[in-house]
Image (spheres, coloured by chain):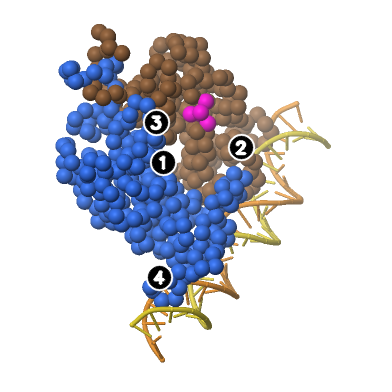
Chain colours: A brown, B blue, C yellow, D orange
Amino acid sequence: MESAENKFCYKYPHPAVTTDCVIFGFDGNYLKILLVKRGVDPYAGCWALPGGFLKPDETVEECAARELREETNLQTELLQPFGVFSKPDRDPRERVMTIPFLALVKYSPNVKGGDDAREARWFDIDAMPELAFDHKEIFKKAIQQLQRIIHFEPIGFDLLEEKFTMPELQKLYQAILNVEFDRRNFQRKMLNSGILIPLDEKENRGGHRSAALFRFDKEKYDQMKLNGSFRIEF
Amino acid sequence: MESAENKFCYKYPHPAVTTDCVIFGFDGNYLKILLVKRGVDPYAGCWALPGGFLKPDETVEECAARELREETNLQTELLQPFGVFSKPDRDPRERVMTIPFLALVKYSPNVKGGDDAREARWFDIDAMPELAFDHKEIFKKAIQQLQRIIHFEPIGFDLLEEKFTMPELQKLYQAILNVEFDRRNFQRKMLNSGILIPLDEKENRGGHRSAALFRFDKEKYDQMKLNGSFRIEF
DNA sequence: ACAAAAGTGTTCCCGCTACACCCATGT
DNA sequence: ACATGGGTGTAGCGGGAACACTTTTGT
């Protein structure tokens, strides 16, 4: 372990710390995850969650946000840590502990690769390649986290455009929770929650009849959340 | 930073990592937290959350469990991490990142101090002393976490004896959620959930009429949880 | 005109809420 | 006997689930 290159020394052993982002997007039909192809060993050529080492002057939240910025050109709506992965041998190089982050972004089919020219690509969440390290495990926990949150908090909007139709919103919920809802009950529940603003426009989805557009009423939601009057469950 | 004592060297800076435990207990009336008095600087003589440094061969979960074992003689029923506190300057000595753990234990008024003879004491959660570092912030987040969890998962039993009465259970929920429930509705909801086993015994609480005893049906709960049929909300 | 998707309303039922009376026990 | 706290039952209401018909639009 000792060499001229190792100039950061401590009295006791310290783990390296990284953050990894599980970035979800929604293309209108499928829930997607953004992966990057690793350029260097270990696991060179293997797909992995985008992430990187914690810098000495940043919090893990800042680190995750920075990584996200560096590796994608996506608008991040939600970024929150979930758990810790700290098995001593999860990285073959040295001890690396990682803080995984759940990220919800506005989907855009073209993502730039990272600064280091790594390839970045969207995958359907049920058609993913093998992942490096214990990233598959991290991904599984991320899905669970996403499902848990969306059960009670209106985070679905983070994955949609500013304006969206009710069928789109329903498809999203169904894709995340992996269940089917009744159209009418879903719509009523959503509208009754009071956090949707009906717009006077309609959007034509190439399908057949055009659907009405809505907008998420963030102000109303924040206010309801404050005085504890917000309650919705799926 | 470099000295003969600092023999663990790395190419890039690594933070020190600790786990801290927010240990909750219930004495029958009040929700309590276990604190230890710090023996050494910084914050010598100040009360703090029990915790300690991550060892090179253990996960954070193992670290938290070890600390809990070393510092208390309590039976731990639940031990789960929540979040990360990683402000670079939260510890004046060097950069120390901490993973806080929520711990629920069977309350016992006498707790032994740690191996290092630190004093350990229970405090009412609304009569706590000043805390070292950012531990007050960690505590606040722990309470929120506890409230969030107990809303939907039957973790209250972790804080009670094997056998308990309905009024005790209700008092616990009220202490955690800081609300009042109607006796009859609370009881019905609990019983309807199907995870309580009524016992044929009664316990005399010195009050007046003796109350019936119940036991938590963990097997039933696990089974219901597996097939997704468990649903309760407070 | 037809198919595919979106808009809308009604009924039923379960679970939550609010509330009142009786019973057991210690003083 | 009385006070304190525990056990039990009921009526009303609101929200969720199940469900059918009409309307729009592209082919």
Residue at 34% across, 22% down: A16
Distance from disc 3 to disc 4, alpha carbons, whole Å, reads 43 Å
Between circles 4 and 1, the one closer to the viewer is 4
Q: Secondary structure at mark 2?
A: loop
Residue B81 on image: x %, y %: 39, 39
Which chain letter matches label 4? B
Between circles 3 and 1, the one closer to the viewer is 3
Residue at 40% across, 13% down: A115
Distance from disc 1 to disc 2, alpha carbons, whole Å, reads 27 Å
The image's mark for residue B205 is: 4
Residue A73 on image: x %, y %: 43, 21
The image's mark for residue B59 is: 3
Q: Are marks 3 and 1 on the same chain?
A: yes
Magenta stretch mostly in which secondary structure? helix
Residue linked to disc 1? B80
Give the amino acid type for the residue marked by disc 4 in the picture: Arg
Residue A200 on image: x %, y %: 54, 41
Q: Which residues are magenta?
A: A136-140
Give the amino acid type for the residue marked by disc 1 in the picture: Gln
